[in-house]
Image (spheres, helix red, strand yellow):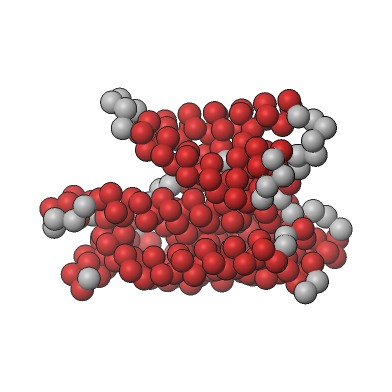
Amino acid sequence: MSYFALAALELTLLGLLSGLAGTLIVLRRRSFFAVALSHATFPGGVVFALAGWNLLLGQAVFAGVLVLLMTLLSRVPGQGRQVASGVVLSFGFALGTLLSSLNPGLGVPVEALLVGSPLSVTATDVAATGAVLVVVLVALAASGRRILFHTFDPVGFAASGFRAWPVELVVTGVVAASIVVAMPAVGAILGVAVIIGPAAAARVIAPRLAWIPPIAAGIGVSGGLIGLWASRETGIAAGGSVGLVITAMFLLALAVRAILPRREGGAARGAADPATVKGRKTAEVRNAAAEA
């Protein structure tokens, strides 16, 4: 398989993954957590590169360590998840920069760790992304209803006798795995955009909660392939091209959302009202939870 075909397949898988993991991140407001995790795994890649081992494995191992650290920090009285994410982001990125600067002659691909390159992914990278996609599908099929219940009605979730930590474990694992497998193609900086951007755009235009994942997957796949094609035709960096296309799609979604209510009149404005949307989504989640 050619390098371009591998890149297209990797971006297609990441686009599908954005419909699942990206939707979780957006709905549960974990964007900053995902940013912190992607940047803070930098030292794991550096250490494993210095040791001559697989960079993806190093980032995965360090991601697990950082998730544990963020969990512990978020339990400190007076602190929260956002503060813990900020501390870990600063620590991880600073440590990675320090390690790479101390070993300038060992060929650590710092640029690849930060921005990645879809055209340099290997069959192993594609297989890892495919495996994560399958695992995420299975995990969400098994616990998706409870995750939605906890997302939109945590008080009702606890009152129903459910425990929150299994949900947090599944969500954190899905987010961490998705961010890590995106790094070879788009790096730590653009990986978050590729995973979160399509879901954010889908949430803007989706008429119902259940439509967000398929719309996000469609945006993710099309944005990745259009960006890859544009990079080949214009000779620009593939990762940056993909990121710009997905950003443009998000802006287009905002424009569509702003135009449609004015054309459709008061009914559309009522449907787009935040309180109405929230009430509708909460009802959907409660109905789904009742069937679980």
Q: Give x and y (percent) for residue 291.
A: 20, 73
Left or right placement of residue 252 versus residue 211 in this view: right
Residue 131 in sight: yes
Would you place residue 87 above or below residue 170 in this image? above
Give the residue at x 60% y 40%: 44
Location of the N terminus (image quadrant):
bottom right
Numbered marks: total = 0
Picture quadrant of residue 8: bottom right
Picture quadrant of residue 6: bottom right
Q: Give x and y (percent) for residue 271.
A: 35, 65
Of residue 86 and residue 167, the one placed in the foreground of this image is: 167
Residue 216 in sight: no
Picture quadrant of residue 250: bottom right
Q: Give x and y (percent) for residue 230.
A: 78, 64
Q: Give x and y (percent) for residue 68.
A: 41, 39
Would you place residue 228 above or below residue 62 in this image? below
Give the residue at x 66% y 61%: 125
Give the residue at x 42% y 35%: 69
Would you place residue 291 above or below residue 254 in this image? below
Of residue 46 and residue 269, the one placed in the foreground of this image is: 46
Of residue 219 and residue 13, the one placed in the foreground of this image is: 13
Give the residue at x 79% y 68%: 4
Location of the C terminus (image quadrant):
bottom left
